[in-house]
Amino acid sequence: MEKSEVRDCFRSVIKDEEKGKKHKGLLIEKVNDEMAKTYIIKAKQNIQLSELYKKNGFDYLIPEAWFYTLYYCALAILLKFGITSRSQRSTAIFLKYVKEKGLI
C-alpha cells in the first residue's frame, strides 16, 4: 500500500469541503473511545440480526448484515487512531496501510 493513497484519502476531504460538499475521505479528529464502543455495539447487533435472519429463513439478508458488522468494526478501529471516515474505500485503504506497517 502506497503512502500516497492514504494521503489522497485525507486530501479529498479538503477538496470536498472547499466545494461545500460532505467529505468522502479520512478526517483527523481526536481519539474517541466512546464512539468506538458505539460502533462495536452496532457490530454486535448486526451479528444478532444475522442469527435472526437465519432462524427465520431470510438468509439472503445475512451478507449485508455481516458486511456492516465488519464495517462498524473498521470504523471503531479508525476512531482508535483518531480518524473518521465517510468512505468505505478510504476506510479499507487506511486499514490496509496500518496493517502493513504493523500498527494493528
Image (tube, rainbow, N blue to C red):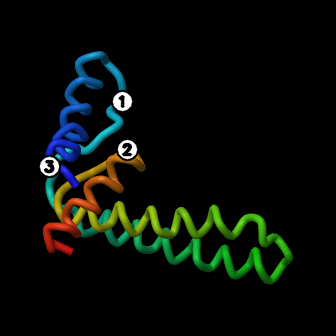
Numbered disc in front, either 3 or 1: 3
Of the image marks 3 and 1, the number of the one nearer the N terminus: 3
Q: Which mark is residue 86?
A: 2
* 40 or 91, nearer to the observer: 91
Q: Image point 39% across, 44% down: which residue?
A: 87
Query: Of the numbered discs in the image, which one, if any, rests on residue 3?
Result: 3
Residue hosting label 1: 22
Name the residue at 25% across, 44% down: 26
Mark 1 residue element:
loop
Pointers 2 and 1 in contact (C-beta within 8 Å): yes
Location of residue 102 (image quadrant)? bottom left
Q: Residue furthest front?
A: 1
Q: Label 3: how many residues lie within 10 Å, few (<14), some (14-19) or many (20+)? A: few
Please name whichever residue, 93 or 35, is drawn nearer the observer in this view of the structure. 93
Q: In the figure, 70 relative to 87: above or below? A: below
> Looking at the picture, which amino acid does disc 1 mark?
Lys
Q: Residue at x 33, y 47 (%)?
A: 90
